[in-house]
Image (cartoon, rainbow, N blue to C red):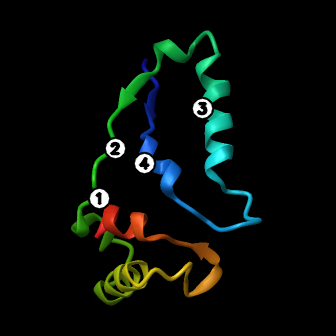
């Protein structure tokens, strides 16, 4: 059995704002740790792909998808509450 591993440097562009624990440096540290593990070369690289809107629509309404895209495009730091950090890069990646 193989274990897939999905990563792309574009993930480092997701900026959740100052003071938030989810930072690009945290991802860099995780990747550095993982790459030093003896089993890391055995992982199966999986290329990221843009999510199909039909798949997103299985859990979100068209109105919500449009709202999220517009909020990202406007450069807003959050979607609906401070619990959901967003960025323009994320909006372009999905919608």
Disc 3 target residue: 31
- Residue 49: x %, y % from top left: 28, 48
- Residue 23: x %, y % from top left: 65, 54
Other-residue count near label 3 (Cα within 10 Å), few / some / many at <14 / 14–19 / ≥20: few
Disc 2 versus disc 3: nearer the observer: 3
Quadrant location of residue 72? Answer: bottom left
Q: Is residue 37 left or right of residue 3?
A: right
Q: Earlier in the sequence, mark 4 or mark 3?
A: 4
Q: Is residue 8 above or below residue 45?
A: below
In this view, which residue lies farthest toward the right?
19
Disc 1 target residue: 51
Q: Is residue 32 above or below residue 84?
A: above
- Residue 26: x %, y % from top left: 68, 45
Label 4 SS? helix
The numbered mark at residue 10 is 4
Label 1 SS? loop
Q: Earlier in the sequence, mark 4 or mark 2?
A: 4
Q: Quadrant of the N terminus?
A: top left
The numbered mark at residue 76 is none
Are the two marked residues, 4 and 3, in contact with CB atoms closer than 8 angstroms? no
Disc 2 target residue: 48
Q: Is residue 47 above or below residue 86?
A: above
Q: Residue at x 32, y 90 (%)?
A: 63
């Amino acid at each position: 059995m193989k274990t897939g591993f999905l990563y792309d440097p574009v993930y480092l562009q997701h900026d959740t704002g100052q003071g938030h624990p989810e930072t690009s440096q945290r991802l860099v540290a995780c990747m550095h740790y993982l790459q030093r593990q003896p089993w890391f070369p055995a992982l199966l690289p999986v290329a990221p792909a843009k999510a199909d809107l039909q798949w997103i629509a299985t859990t979100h309404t068209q109105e919500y998808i449009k709202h999220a895209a517009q909020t990202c495009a406007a450069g807003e730091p959050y979607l609906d509450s401070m619990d959901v950090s967003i960025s323009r890069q994320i909006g372009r990646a999905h919608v």
